[in-house]
Amino acid sequence: MKAQQDKLLTILRDRFEQNAHRHQGLGWADVQARLVSKPNALKSLGAMESSGGEPDVIGHDRKTGELTFCDCAAESPKGRRSLCYDRAALEARKEDKPKGSAVETAAAMGVELLTEERYRALQALGEFDTKTSSWISTPKEIRSLGGALFCDRRYGKVFVYHNGAQSYYAARGFRGFLRV
């Protein structure tokens, strides 16, 4: 357990140092101290990392010390693709069911799906999902009509689209968001 934690912290530190533009004014020692005191957060970050998310710090509340992490892999995490949107969508499929849903997988990992606002904020830090797409948190009024939202970046712009919540594609996954 300790060896796994140390390995994860090394990976996170290296990524943190290589991408200082995502978290200017924040030092690794402060991040590590907060993470070590939050074992559930480390477990969630481990799940994000092991599924290809490449989590990194993208925000810091100076008053509370709260850190925000997000999957910063260039493309939607490979280990979280080919998922429909949620449990209701999964149950609605009569054949060719996907292996699961984005909402349930995120909950099991202890993370949230990005909102449209958070997705756009992430895109301000780099170019993500230029070949893939990612489910985002869908407002109830859209979901109640059978739809769900996803985003990507094409032609230098961020796009928000809709699809049936039961759909799934090899190039669509989701990005996790975690407050620590």
Image: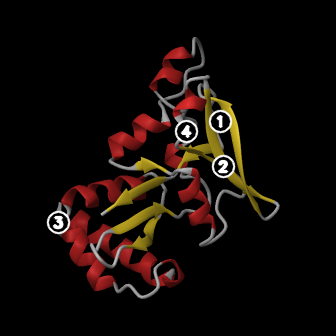
In this view of the protein, which residue sits in the foreground, 93 or 163? 163
- Check disc 2 and give the amino acid type: Cys
Tell me the number on the disc at residue 151: 2
Please report the residue visible at 27 percent of the width from the left and 72 percent of the height from the top. 64
Using residue 20 as the reference point, say whether residue 42 is left or right of it. Answer: left
Q: Name the residue beneath numbered marker 3.
A: 2
Cα separation between marks 4 and 2: 11 Å
- The residue beneath circle 4 is 138
Q: Do the residues under discs 4 and 1 have CB atoms within 8 angstroms? A: no
The answer to whether one can see residue 132 in this image is no
Q: Residue at x 66, y 56 (%)?
A: 129
Quadrant containing the N terminus in the rendered view: bottom left
Which quadrant of the figure has residue 119?
A: bottom right
**Percent position of residue 26, x then y:** 38, 84
Callout 1: SS: loop
Mark closer to the observer (3, 2):
2
Q: Earlier in the sequence, mark 4 or mark 1?
A: 4
Please, what is the three-letter code of the amino acid marked with disc 1?
Tyr
Q: Are marks 3 and 1 in contact (CB under 8 Å)?
A: no
Whichever of labels 4 and 3 marks the residue nearer the N terminus, that label is 3
Image side of residue 47 versus residue 127, left or right: left
